[in-house]
Amino acid sequence: MALWPNKRRKETARVCDANASPFAVFENVGLTIGQRKILEGLTLSLDERRIGVIGLNGSGKSTFIRMLNGLRTPDTGDLKLFGAGFAEAEQELPHHVGFVFQNPDHQAIFPTVEEEIAFGLTQLGADKAESRIRALEFLERHGCAELATSPIAELSEGQKQLICILAVLVMEPRLLVLDEPMTSLDALASRRIRDKLLSLPQKIVMVSHDLSHFEGFDRILWLEDGRLRMDGNPHEVLAAYCRDIDGRSGIKMELAAL
Amino acid sequence: MISIYLQKESWIHRTPAGFKLLAVAIASLLLFQVKSIWIFLPCLAVVLGLYASLGREGLAQLKLLRGLTMFLVILLALHWVSGTFWEGVAIIMRLIVLFLAANLVSITTRMDDMLEVIQPLFKPLQLFGLSSRKPALGVTLVLRFAPHMLQVFSILREAYQARTGARGSWRLLAPFAIQSLRMSDNVAEALKARGGSQGLSR
Amino acid sequence: MADRSLVHVAFYAALIAALGLVPPVAIPFLGGVPITAQTLGVMLAGVMLGPVRGGLAVLLFLFLVALGAPILAGGRGGLGVFATPSVGFLIGWPVGAFVAGWIMNSMKGTNILVAAAVSAVVGGIGVVYAFGIPGVAYVAGLSLSKAAIGSAIYIPGDLVKVVITAIVTQTVARGLPGAVFTRT
């Protein structure tokens, strides 16, 4: 609201450096909720353009990527994001880190595409009229001008997810974090979304259960029981992961046979 | 957007929302001091005239009164029994005039414009460290949730029907609440990921 | 977490709206008086969210009604409804939700079914009628006793809603404990 700027917020100096390299440094980071260790002893630094995250359900993937956007706060260790400590950076993170969720229905807030895109701009302080114009321009640049006035609820799943990604991109983040963005999409739609993602200048951290989505990625992190099990180039990590899954399902089958 | 707003071009539509709201507020205050049929009659004529000036669709809006008929009949009967028939008539006329006048604002003002006019009233919220954007964002969220909830409910009902043959039951309310509450948690998280309701002024 | 609160407030406002779409049920042994599900939402908002957020949820709902959304039971909406005899009940709703939430908060040690039922009766019926009856009397020009008798036909239906509120609250407390804010 340009008319009544929130003074307290304006006075806080910016602490994040958008060009920091590496953009995230984890040092012995952990998080325990109740009795459960969600993440434990995580030490790594992220700098590559395309980073994939794999692991079974409950391995801590979601928590890990949510820390990048400030949605989860670590309770042990030291986390630096964009050159600033987590606590200081937390407020600014939504600006630098765009987060795309698995289910577009849970992300989109507004009834129409145009309003959804404009929201990101008003979040950054633009007034209503200006953000509307810029939202339309932005949609046009991304070839979605004809969707501007469409109700989001009436779009196809692929279009919905695309709009959710654009709604985040309009805030011009440096990093895009995606939590299984292709889960509800058909093969063609997920291919289109993947191509869109690879064409972006933003750095990307993506969680997926479909390993084929990591084509063209630079690095894969494999989490297991809240710890980093393997970290390296996609070829090696994915191959090891597949062997592991094969091995485990083999054991389970034998047990069931008894 | 769901609203009783009547899509149309008219001089009442063009009148600023703030003016219309103020006029209705003043009219309500004044009419509650009055008890005479001879004042309500011309008022009723004026209001009906205003609806007529919107044309056929305007007059069709008078159907909104239908929901009140039953009540008005009972009310008149009660007054008649108590021997205050004419007082009852006056009260009913006041009711109709105020109802129609207030609704006239609603059917000729877009929700956005209404919000815009009311927005300054929320400015004092900032004294408590709250953003004056919150009410508007709240409205958006309600409009967003409502259709989604119906969808959640119809899926549950279908599953219930498949298992029991019954079309629905109040039993579904609890799972419905649980499922849609979980959805609302996801929405809250997604909102926070984009900077929350306070925004991120640079 | 303020954003989460805002979303929950909006959620219950939407719930009250959605319950308004449930067709009114006429219960024969109650003399065929139609009961709508809407006040069930008011009770739930108070009992589940607590006084402040529960009250705000109902206020937000009424705000939407005032803006012209036809979300009151029977598809009513707009400023006009605030000129009808129901206005007292509408004003009583947020206060009732507040009181219900407050009682729920102060009965943390009690069995959840009992606590929810007591809160819903006092807040959702007692307080709501305390505002509603004078409202009817004032707008309709009736005596308080006549207005009270006229309004009383809805009380049996409201008692049914109290029972549902208690059961739903208890079930949600088992299925998604974090969602019953008056118990955390």
Image (cartoon, rainbow, N blue to C red):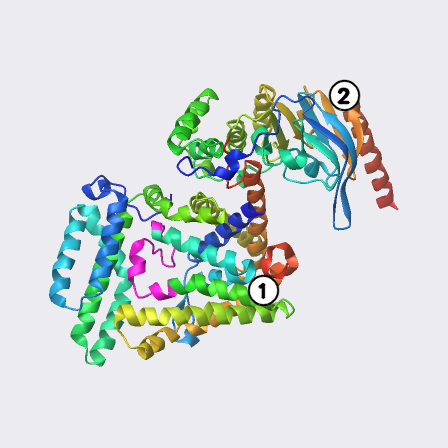
Residue at the spot of label 1: C105
The circle on residue A233 is 2
**Identity of the amino acid at label 1?**
Asn
Depth check, front residue: A18 or B53: A18
Depth check, front residue: C70 or C5: C5
Instruction: Give the total number of marks visible in the rendering.
Output: 2
The circle on residue B105 is none
Depth check, front residue: A21 or A68: A21
Of tags 2 and 1, the one toward the viewer is 1
Q: Mark 2 lies on which chain?
A: A
Q: What stretch is highlighted in magenta?
A: C67-90
Is residue B188 rendered to the left or right of residue A38?
left
At a point 18% along the width and 45% down the height, the residue shown is: B54
Whether B127 is among the magenta residues is no
Residue A42 placed where, x, y %? 78, 34
- Regarding residue C160, the answer to whether it shows in the image is no
Instruction: Confirm or deny contact between disc 2 and disc 1 (CB under 8 A).
Output: no
Residue B43 placed where, x, y %? 15, 58
**Identity of the amino acid at label 2?**
Asn
Q: Residues within 10 Å of mark 1 (few under 14, many from 20)?
A: many
Q: Residues within 10 Å of mark 2 (few under 14, many from 20)?
A: some
Farthest right residue in view? A258
Q: Determine whether the residue tagged by mark 2 lies in a helix, strand or loop.
A: loop
